[in-house]
Image (spheres, helix red, strand yellow):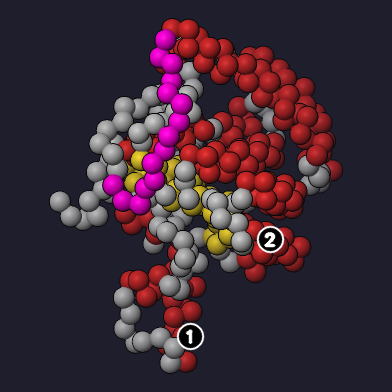
């Protein structure tokens, strides 16, 4: 298994990756000085608008608690100040990569550990809930970007079995964000022909959230575009434990043989009809998989980027795909 760290700089593409991939086409980048200047200007402008968009969006999100609502109000001005302090992009090498990856092989199945929401907020003097809120906006956009690029399956680590150990205020905020964004996600899925799936043990969630998950899956089941998979109340070890219990119950009924293959056992996993990830991306610079898709990532290619999740965009996704293209996937062979 090859692992590398992807700083937010251009990565030279190597030999095309093999495996379950699709061709990606796009508009060729200019490469001229004028084109670079335009790209720099275009990338710098959203920096000053970034905070204002969050402040505009915040009234649309239901308050979690009186305390969190007060924090959002207290820090509304901080976002504007933070944006004015963000340095403009002045070096062509630091400008975002054009959404152009002509000739690259796009992995059919991509998984993302969306890390860094809290640090994104802390850097701006904001409560962690604001980081999670901005991270939800990034999810919406990346779903659309992934579909445009040609990715067939996108799996994100939305809420782990260990996340219940966070403060009750933060867990409550995350539940409320899910309630709000579930409605938006349903609308966006319809607009972009996205099918939604959820993996993990949903039984621990409140009843209204379980209903929302069921509605998302049922309403989008016939969509034929990107399959978006949310891992919620999910842990790789817990998934394997639950699969083992399902197998034992099936064997006791006589519905499963005493000896099974890896493929047979995979049929008891949450992802039984979802391809294993070709590429696993983790944001924020952390170098671990944190109990995510432990079984499925046995032969995935890993790319780690320092970019915090709320700042992750289509250009960074293409950078990660370029890094993936430099890998030689041998699956134990030579």
Disc 1 marks which residue?
249
Magenta includes 25?
A: yes
Q: Determine the residue positioned at 38% across, 41% down.
A: 23
Q: Which residue is mark 2?
A: 219
Q: Main secondary structure of the magenta part?
A: loop
The residue segment tinted magenta is 18-32
Q: Specify few, some or many for label 1: CA neighbours under 10 Å numbering under 14, 14-19, or 20 or more.
A: few
Residue 260 highlighted magenta (yes or no): no
| Distance between mark 1 and mark 2 Cα atoms | 31 Å
- Percent across and percent down for residue 167 are 67, 50
- Residues at marks 1 and 2 touching, judged by CB atoms closer than 8 Å: no
Can you tell which quarter of the image residue 318 is in?
top left
Foreground tag (1 vs 2): 2
Instruction: Return the disc, 1 or 2, that comes first in the chain's sequence.
Output: 2
Please state which of residues 315 and 180 is positioned toward the viewer in this rendering. Answer: 315
Which residue is nearer to you in this view: 332 or 34?
34
Image point (35%, 27%), residue name = 11
Residue 283 position (above or below residue 187):
above
Q: Residue at 43% across / 72% down in the picture?
A: 267
Q: Would residue 230 be seen by someone viewing this image from the given angle?
A: no
Residue 188 in the image: x percent, y percent?
67, 46
**SS of the residue under disc 1:** helix
Q: Examine the rendering and report whether any part of residue 275 can be seen.
A: yes
Q: Residue 298: x percent and y percent? A: 33, 57
> In screen coordinates, is 149 left or right of 295?
right
Residue in view at x 31 percent, y 31 percent: 13
């Amino acid at each position: 298994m090859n692992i590398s760290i992807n700083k937010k700089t251009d990565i030279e593409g190597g030999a095309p990756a093999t495996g379950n991939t699709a061709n990606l086409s796009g508009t060729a980048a200019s490469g001229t000085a004028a084109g670079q200047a335009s790209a720099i200007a275009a990338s710098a402008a959203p920096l000053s608008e970034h905070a204002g968009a969050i402040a505009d969006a915040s009234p649309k999100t239901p308050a979690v608690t009186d305390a969190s609502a007060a924090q959002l109000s207290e820090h509304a001005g901080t976002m504007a100040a933070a944006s004015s302090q963000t340095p403009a992009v002045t070096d062509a090498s630091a400008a975002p990569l054009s959404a152009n990856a002509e000739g690259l092989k796009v992995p059919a199945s991509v998984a993302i550990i969306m890390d860094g929401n809290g640090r994104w907020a802390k850097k701006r003097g904001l409560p962690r809930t604001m980081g999670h809120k901005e991270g939800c906006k990034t999810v919406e956009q990346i779903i659309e970007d992934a579909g445009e690029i040609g990715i067939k399956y996108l799996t994100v680590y939305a809420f782990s079995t260990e996340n219940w150990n966070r403060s009750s205020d933060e867990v409550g905020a995350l539940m409320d964000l899910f309630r709000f964004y579930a409605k938006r996600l349903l609308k966006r899925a319809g607009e972009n022909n996205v099918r939604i799936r959820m993996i993990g043990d949903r039984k621990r969630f409140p009843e209204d959230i379980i209903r929302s998950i069921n509605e998302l899956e049922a309403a989008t089941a016939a969509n034929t575009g990107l399959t978006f998979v949310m891992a919620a109340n999910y842990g790789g070890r817990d998934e394997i434990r639950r699969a083992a219990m399902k197998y034992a119950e099936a064997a006791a009924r006589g519905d499963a043989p005493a000896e099974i293959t890896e493929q047979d056992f995979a049929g008891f996993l949450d992802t039984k009809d979802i391809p294993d990830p070709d590429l696993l991306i983790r944001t924020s610079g952390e170098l671990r998989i944190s109990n995510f898709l432990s079984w499925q990532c046995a032969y995935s290619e890993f790319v780690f980027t320092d970019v915090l999740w709320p700042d992750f965009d289509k250009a960074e996704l293409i950078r990660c795909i370029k890094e993936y293209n430099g890998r030689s996937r041998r699956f134990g062979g030579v």
